[in-house]
């Protein structure tokens, strides 16, 4: 059984106490009327990762054991020296409102199809439309020369243990750069035709987030088409150590919103920086916002991810921020929940007010 340690970073809480106090406004009063949860509580979760070196990491949420309580998938793209790269993931079952649990699956491992990658991503959705969730694992293949490519594999029909009935072939989609600072993947029906599409994003070596869309995955996981060219979102950070992306209809109008997250790595504590937008059916973005920054969870990372899901069962989607901490020795997943995303009516930024910045 892997160990989970849930704790508040006392020093960090103190550090951010001042700005939190300033943020306590009438919105806080309004919230307390509608739900009993204590506001402003930051709970950082730490879970031991599955190796000492990663080339990408990601997080996803799905109730895989079907009991109505969210389960969290944590993925580490293992990059040993020497040895083949591997996707390794684990299910954290039935998490509480802060994303914490003591109940874990075993760790799954499979060859990731690459010997070197500049990032990795994971997403869960029912690609073959049989009512049973499927998992996509992607690495951003970084050959020694030439452009990178997104390379993904689908595990179809996950059981309650998180194991698929079978794996697809590997599929490749043209990349957005020759080098990158992490990559990520998210399933969503971007063109609105009822078949899942795969959003593939990477942060290039200069700090720009760019994406490609693999439209309409068939029952074997292969995409029908892609965008004619990749799309540039924006510059996120000159020194970036992680990228996350997730797609979800946050405002309930039937069109998917998207959040892109870069994990800025300045000299001190890292920060999560999010851009939000709405997808048009042609794969372009509307209402793309400037970045909005949240406190990070570590000083050095080898990948990061975000997931959009209602963790505290409030009826509103939350955002989970995760980075894979890279201290000397074993890595750790570190993550926390930002509750109840809300669109700022003026800036159009989808944000949670409960996390100090
Ligand atoms: Ca569950
Ligand atoms: Ca399925
Ligand atoms: Ca589609
Ligand atoms: Ca919520």
Image: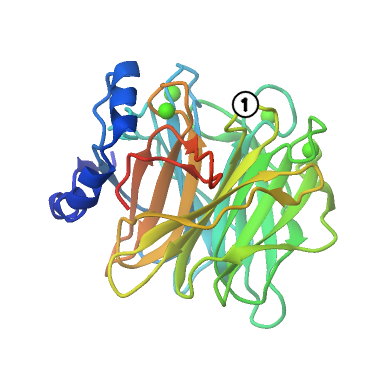
Q: Residue at x 60, y 64 (%)?
A: 234
Relative side of 18 to 125, left or right = left
Relative side of 252 to 340, left or right = right
Quadrant of the picture in which ligand 1 is shown:
top left
Residue 59 seen by the camera: no
Q: Quadrant of residue 23?
A: top left
How far across and down, in percent of the image, does residue 200 sit?
A: 66, 54
Relative side of 209 to 69, left or right = right
How far across and down, in percent of the image, does residue 295 sit?
A: 33, 55
Front-most of 91 and 43?
43
Front-most of 26 and 331?
26
Q: Quadrant of the N terminus?
A: top left
Residue count near mark 1 (Cα–Cα under 10 Å), binned few <14, some 14–19, many ≥20: few
Residue 245 seen by the camera: yes
Residue 308 to residue 244: above or below: above
Give the mark count: 1
Q: Residue at x 53, y 43 (%)?
A: 346
Visual colour scheme: rainbow
For disc 1, the marked residue is: 252
Q: Quadrant of residue 71?
A: top left
Q: Residue at x 18, y 49 (%)?
A: 17
* Helix, strand or loop for disc 1: loop
Label 1 residue near ligand 4, CB within 8 Å: no
How far across and down, in percent of the image, does residue 265 sit?
A: 38, 69
Relative side of 273 to 143, left or right = left
């Amino acid at each position: 059984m892997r160990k989970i340690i849930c704790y508040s970073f006392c020093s960090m809480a103190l550090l951010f106490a001042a700005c939190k106090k300033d943020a306590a406004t009438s919105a806080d009063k309004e919230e307390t009327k509608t739900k009993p949860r204590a506001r402003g509580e930051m709970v950082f979760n730490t879970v031991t990762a599955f190796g000492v070196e990663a080339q990408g990491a990601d997080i996803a949420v799905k109730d895989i054991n079907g009991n109505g309580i969210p389960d969290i998938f944590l993925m580490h793209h293992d990059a040993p020296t020497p040895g083949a790269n591997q996707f390794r993931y684990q299910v954290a079952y039935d998490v509480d409102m802060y994303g914490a649990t003591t109940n874990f699956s075993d760790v799954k491992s499979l060859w990731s199809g690459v010997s070197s990658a500049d990032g990795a991503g994971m997403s869960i959705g029912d690609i073959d439309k049989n009512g049973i969730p499927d998992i996509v694992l992607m690495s951003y293949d970084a050959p020694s020369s030439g452009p990178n490519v997104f390379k993904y594999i689908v595990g179809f029909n996950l059981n309650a243990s998180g194991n698929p009935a079978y794996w697809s072939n590997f599929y490749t989609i043209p990349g957005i750069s020759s080098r990158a600072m992490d990559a990520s993947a998210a399933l969503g029906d971007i063109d609105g035709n009822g078949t899942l599409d795969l959003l593939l994003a990477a942060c290039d070596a200069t700090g720009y987030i760019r994406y490609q869309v693999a439209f309409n995955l068939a029952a074997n996981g292969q995409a029908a088409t892609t965008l004619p060219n990749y799309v540039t979102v924006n510059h996120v950070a000159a020194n970036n150590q992680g990228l996350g992306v997730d797609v979800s209809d946050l405002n309930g109008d039937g069109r998917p919103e998207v959040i892109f997250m870069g994990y800025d790595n300045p000299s001190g504590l890292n920060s999560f920086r999010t851009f939000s937008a709405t997808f048009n059916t042609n794969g372009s973005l509307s209402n793309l916002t400037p970045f909005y920054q949240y406190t990070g969870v570590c000083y050095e990372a080898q990948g990061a991810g975000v997931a959009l899901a209602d963790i505290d069962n409030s009826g509103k989607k939350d955002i989970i921020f995760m980075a894979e901490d890279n201290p000397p020795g074993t890595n750790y997943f570190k993550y926390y929940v930002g509750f109840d995303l809300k669109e700022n009516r003026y800036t159009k930024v989808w944000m949670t007010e409960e996390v100090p910045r």
